[in-house]
Amino acid sequence: MAVARLVGRAGELSALLARCVSEPAGAVLVTGEAGVGKTRLLDELAGRMRSGGALVLRGHGVRGGGPFRPLAHALVRVSPPELAEAPELRPYAAVLARLLPGWPSATPEAGHLVDPVVVLGEAVRALLHVLAGGRRAVLVLDDLHWADRDTLGVLEYLSADPPMPLVLAARDDERGPPGLDVVGRRSTRMSLDRLDATHVGVLAAQRAGAAVDGDVVTFLTAASGGLPFLVTELTGDLIDSGQLQRDHGRWRADGPLRTRVPDAYTRLVETRVAALGASERTLVRTAALLGDELDWQFVAAATGDDPSPGVRAAIDAGLFHTSEPDALHWRHALTRDAVLDGLNPPERVELSRRAAARLRGVELAGAQLAAAADLCARAGDRSRAAQLLLDLGREHLAAAALTAAGDALASAAALVDDGAGPAAQIAGERLRVLALAARTDDALALGEQVLPGLPVDGAAGVRLQLARACVVAERWDQAADHLDATSRGSAERLAIAAHVALGRRDVDGALRVAADAVAVGRRDGVPEAVCEALEITGRALRRSDPPASRAAFAEGERLAAEHGLVVWRIRALAEMGTHDMLASADLRRLRQARLLAEESGLLGTAMMLDLQLLAATAGIDGYVATLPFARRCAETAARLRLPGPAAHAMLFVGRGRFWSGDTEGALAALEEYLRTSPDPVPSTFARAPTQAYDAWLSHDGIRAAERLSMAVEALRASTVSSPAPFWGHWALLSTVVHPDDPAPLEELRDSDVLVQAANHAALHYGDAVLAARAGAPDRSRELVEAGDAILSGRNHERLFQRSLMITSDGAAAAFDAEVLLREALTRWEPAGEVRLVRWCRERLRMLGLPVPRPGRDHTAVPPALRAIGITGRELEVLRLVADGATNAEVATRLHLSPRTVETHVSNLLAKTGATTRGQLAGWLPAPGP
């Protein structure tokens, strides 16, 4: 039958088409009762968009379809595994494997830094962008009243800033799942009403192939209630049953018409089912029990018969239909409901019992597990149903669908008595879900609820899960209580106990227990516990014995690689990379760890490594150079809903703006950092360093040293001491302005913050100042060279610390101030270090030395930008535009006229092909990874 034209929805279709071509992209939620025509409207929309050359991604939900089913349905056919090689999708390939068969599989995490739904949202956003490829596209998802909460979580995330128009549809005549309301609030709602009599007549005539008499239209309007689906079904039934006759090109009633609402469609379906043969009826009724998804192989396994004759008969009877060669569907969701309504309770139980028995021994997955569990529960086999739901929960957990996993496991728990069957396993998995979701209080409450009814062995596993949840939440005492209630021999228990000891600052105890965990783990073949214990060992020794610490991490990395423990390998590489970062400018291991995290879909871990790379790059190239990277980190962390990393990245944004001369922007970023950081941040710790450097740039070294002292005092009071570089800056500057006070330098000398190369170099430079004051220039020169050697590869930090030693009278140590200041100018002026450049020029004038003229175009232009004709000055403008500066702000900071800046921006747009200032930012190369 040819596709008929849409009836009665012209206004709604026009509105949807307009939304699909408008900017910016938005989300529309089409609602209405079953049979009102939502799917038909979406079919018409999809056809119109495709005919206009747009990419249409179409999916729909089904009852019990499992996590992410609507999205997977929309994406799987247009996303072959080869697409995972696209550079834009490399960070997300493993994450998208949750939706797309054949893609690189995801790496299970011991704990999620990022909500897995948010990670998948980012991955789907990237995939949609790649699939669209610059052309118009739309994502159309139907039947979301059956969507799982994890799918709705992804749609909630996408609808906040849609990468393409989202057209969604759901019933409003039944209670929707939690989360649908949130999606609805972020969408434009479009409610479909029933058809009036005029449109019922048009639709009936379309179905009948000719005009229909008015009395028939009146009957159809009353019988269908104006529901388009029932109008077409009842019209066909009236014709098939002979109640309508064609007379002179019109359909007329041949006597009184029979059928009434609300039972019209149920009776129609019952009549069609009754007309089938016995085996065909059994197939249709069993298929109805198995769910909305018509998997003919699953139906065959549940009935034990060849499904071909029954499927053909059901299609002929208008109960099933095929939309494509391999896809079988119910004629409508109401069709399945009507088949179920035609079964009495004993029939349901008997059919369920037979189907469940035939499915024993069949390998099941996904929605099949849920359907089989439902059959077992109906047949009274609660233990078997619970086991199937446990398997389903574990499957969801492996896909990081935490909400779906929690729901399946809660249903499993409701089917078993305390301590019976798989009760302990179910409880353990439920605790694991809660721990991964960082719901520590809920995990502890569940533990208290289930522990009394569990046998000893089962209780021990649950207590270990509870201890881990407490460790993640840093509730050390509660973790210890749960560990004390378990046997002391297992490697996993010892590894957790080492973690607890280190959290309590019992370093010796942590080392002792970690050593036991390593020994037991090696003996019992538990490499995960050994890797965990080696990590604790390395962290405990990081400052007191760096070589031993590095050796522990190296052994953990080797063991993890040997056993394919990707998460533990990433963690070990990150720890070794931190050693390298603190001791030198070698960032290779950090970058290796980040790449591995990205390829494994661990976006939260990759984000944390980005922040470490950001800090290291600031010491190499300066805060101004890292400003675009810092902003991207802040934006990415915010999208991933990581408030801590997002706030930390904003701190780097503030520092970059400060050194670039944007004082107002620096203060705004700093206030945002203080406002958004999830951890209490002392305002002194946050503000004092910037205030100190501002004073030093104003040539007030004494006040600068005082403000740095306040920042160091905040570090001393912190529960976790940080080897921040400003600790060394404080000791060095204090020695320069107060050379008779040895306390700052001696404190630095005795501190474990020397693990940070910047602080170690500052110690040498401070000693060089004292040597020069004592009349030992050769010794002073040696110490300066030693400090330079430590900072080899960190030119920005080297030049900055050397500048701290230049007073208004000259260098406080044995080196040539003029040579140093001129070198600093050649490096800092092209990098946009506005405040430092100004300070160098002012200091040269104070020393009575010649001041070089400002360079006009000596900025080093990356090859890719040089190839399209970007000049050094245009690159300086590009950097500021990428940071969000207006033309007026660029003009002020580069000492140019507004008209000149406008010319530079126009040239940049022309050379890059960008159409907006925002697109220009994408041309700026990022420092770091």
Image: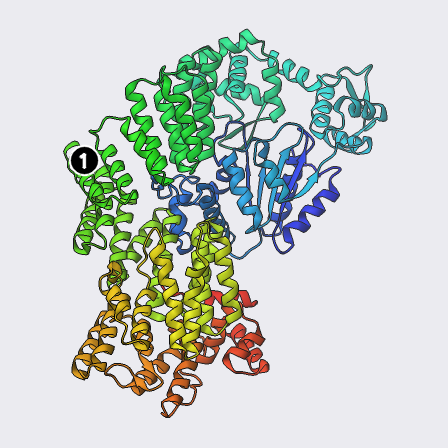
Please say which color scheme the image uses. rainbow
**Coordinates of residue 140 in the picture (x, y in percent):** 58, 42
At 67% from the left and 36% from the top, the residue drawn is 31
* In-image side of 566 versus 877 (left or right): left
Q: Is residue 97 above or below residue 729?
A: above
Quadrant where the N terminus sits is: top right
Quadrant where the C terminus sits is: bottom left
User: Which three-letter amino acid code belongs to the residue tagged 1?
Assistant: Gly
- Which residue is label 1 attached to? 521
**Coordinates of residue 514 in the picture (x, y in percent):** 20, 40
Q: Is residue 644 above or below residue 827?
A: above
User: 687 or 246: nearer the eye?
Assistant: 687
**Residue 102: quadrant of the picture:** top left
**Coordinates of residue 504 in the picture (x, y in percent):** 29, 42
Confirm whether residue 905 shows in the render.
yes
User: 34 or 653: nearer the eye?
Assistant: 653
At 51% from the left and 12% from the top, the residue drawn is 279
**Residue 870: quadrant of the picture:** bottom left
Label 1: few (<14), some (14–19) or many (≥20) C-alpha neighbours in 10 Å: many
At 54% from the left and 47% from the top, the residue drawn is 158
Q: Is residue 336 above or below residue 787?
A: above
The residue furthest top is 346
**Coordinates of residue 534 in the picture (x, y in percent):** 21, 44
User: 922 or 496: nearer the eye?
Assistant: 496
Confirm whether residue 275 shows in the render.
no
At 52% from the left and 33% from the top, the residue drawn is 148
* In-image side of 661 versus 539 (left or right): right
Looking at the rendered structure, the secondary structure element under dot 1 is: helix
Please state the total of marks drawn on the protein image: 1
* In-image side of 521 versus 838 (left or right): left
